[in-house]
Amino acid sequence: MTAAIVALGMLLSTPAPADVDLSWIAGDWRLCEPDRVIEERWMGPRGDLFVGANHSFEKGRASFEFMRIARDKDGWAYLASPGGRSPPTVFRLIDARGTSAVFANPDHDFPKRVAYAREGDALTARIEGPVNGKPVEMVWRFEKGDASGC
């Protein structure tokens, strides 16, 4: 077993501390390209809850997702509801450092990991996991501001 696989296994099995600061994710974020506009809005924190929504317009089609980041007795979790689906898919916080956070659900088909990182006025969102046995990563880089500026 390589050192990288051992390190990944340790990271996935070690719960992140419950007292992390995730307030850096709050705000309006947009990705503006000629063929797509994607916006994410994160409200909070209020208590131990952030509420988010994603609104995407690509290839002439609109879609949405409801999201939450909440703390419960087991720590922080990211809850995703693409298209408003219920119940949400739960991803547990496995790593939080400064202005980045990684959430994982090893039992979910795709994605298995959801990650956010902020650098100044940019927020990067990433999902990753296997699709048909091959690793897949999707990345979005948002800028601060709502989509009215697109």
Image (cartoon, rainbow, N blue to C red):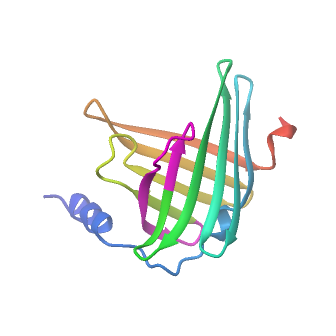
Residue 102 part of the magenta segment: no
Q: Residue at x 35, y 54 (%)?
A: 105
Q: Quadrant of residue 150?
A: top right
Residue 91 part of the magenta segment: yes
Vertical placement of residue 140 versus 10, above or below: above
Magenta region, main secondary structure: strand
Q: Residue at x 54, y 66 (%)?
A: 70
Q: Which residues are magenta?
A: 79-99
Spot occupied by residue 5 in the image (x, y as percentages of width and height): 22, 58
* Outermost front residue: 86
In the image shown, does 89 or 41 lie closer to the viewer?
89
* Outermost bottom residue: 19
Spot occupied by residue 140 in the image (x, y as percentages of width and height): 59, 42
Spot occupied by residue 40 in the image (x, y as percentages of width and height): 68, 47
Spot occupied by residue 44 in the image (x, y as percentages of width and height): 70, 66
Q: Residue at x 65, y 58 (%)?
A: 51
